[in-house]
Image: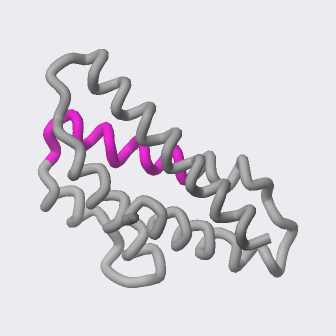
Amino acid sequence: MMLRFASAALCALLLAPAAQAQVASPQVLCGSMGALAVSVMQNRQYGVSRADMLALAPEEGEEVQVFRALISEAYSVPIQETRLGRESVIDGFRKAIEASCIQTIRGIT
């Protein structure tokens, strides 16, 4: 549920300025969101505290809820014991965020 909210919020945030300019493809927009998801989950998997991650989130603006939702979702996943396990979780998180983003954009357009 939180994942869907994060995707919807970020898509709306990314699409708003694009409505006045040339629109980037869903793959480009959602790829950016996937890159953010990778960063958040990497930090989670390598032991960065939730408090430190939240401190990196913007304090104001529309993107605050998006970052907090991604952080919340990432921190609901346990830290994996092995490098392979961490890589798998990071890649799975990216794929889930990107897929949710694309579904959200298709629902908007």
Along the line of sight, which residue is nearer the eye, 3 or 66? 3
Q: Locate residue 45, reporting x and y percent.
A: 23, 36
Q: Locate residue 99, reporting x and y percent.
A: 59, 47
Residue 16 included in the magenta stretch of the image: no
Residue 56 quadrant? bottom left
- In this figure, what is the number of numbered marks? 0
Residue in view at x 71 percent, y 49 percent: 28
Along the line of sight, which residue is nearer the eye, 96 or 42? 96
Q: Is residue 81 left or right of residue 83?
A: left
* Quarter placement of the N terminus: bottom left
Q: Is residue 27 left or right of residue 73?
A: right
Q: Locate residue 35, reporting x and y percent.
A: 51, 44
Secondary structure that dominates the magenta span? helix
Along the line of sight, which residue is nearer the eye, 103 or 6? 103
Q: Residue extending furthest right?
A: 22
Q: Is residue 79 left or right of residue 67?
A: left
Residue in view at x 49 percent, y 45 percent: 96
Q: Locate residue 103, reporting x and y percent.
A: 65, 57
- Position of residue 18 relative to residue 70, above or below, is below
The magenta span reads 33-48
- Position of residue 6 relative to residue 43, above or below, is below
Residue in view at x 16 percent, y 56 percent: 50
Residue 46 included in the magenta stretch of the image: yes
